[in-house]
Amino acid sequence: MVVDREHDNYREIKSIGRCEVVQSFVYLGSLVDNSGSCENEIRQRIQQARVAMTELTKIWRDHYITKATK
């Protein structure tokens, strides 16, 4: 996979074959895109944190789970 600003969709690479040119991809948990900015990655991480906190709301409000466990 190659991230590039050009619009052709395939490039020839020796011994590997054809690689698709993409706008963005996730590598080791980080969003890599062709713009070079980190704005989209920051938005993605904020969204992931929001989802995780929403899932924990039930546990925090449960009176049968002790504070030590929470």
Image (spheres, rainbow, N blue to C red):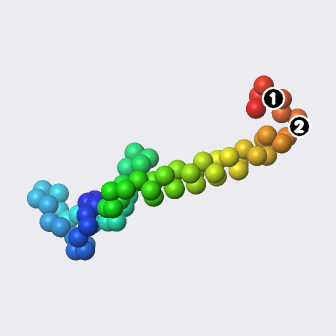
Percent across and percent down for residue 34 are: 31, 61
At 64% from the left edge and 47% from the top edge, which residue is drawn?
52
Residue at image mark 1: 67
Q: Amino acid at mark 1?
A: Lys
Q: Which mark is residue 63?
A: 2
Q: Residue furthest right?
A: 63
On-image quarter of the N terminus: bottom left
At 44% from the left edge and 56% from the top edge, which residue is drawn?
39
* 59 on left or right of 63: left
Secondary element at tag 2: loop
At 17% from the left edge and 57% from the top edge, which residue is drawn?
16
Q: Residue furthest top?
A: 68
Q: Amino acid at mark 2?
A: His
* 44 on left or right of 63: left
Q: Residue furthest left?
A: 14
39 and 68: which is toward the camera:
39
Q: Is residue 25 visible?
A: yes
Q: CA distance from mark 2 to mark 1?
A: 9 Å
Rendered position, 21 above or below 64: below
Percent across and percent down for residue 70 are: 76, 32
6 and 1: which is toward the camera:
6
* 61 on left or right of 56: right
Q: Is residue 20 visible?
A: no
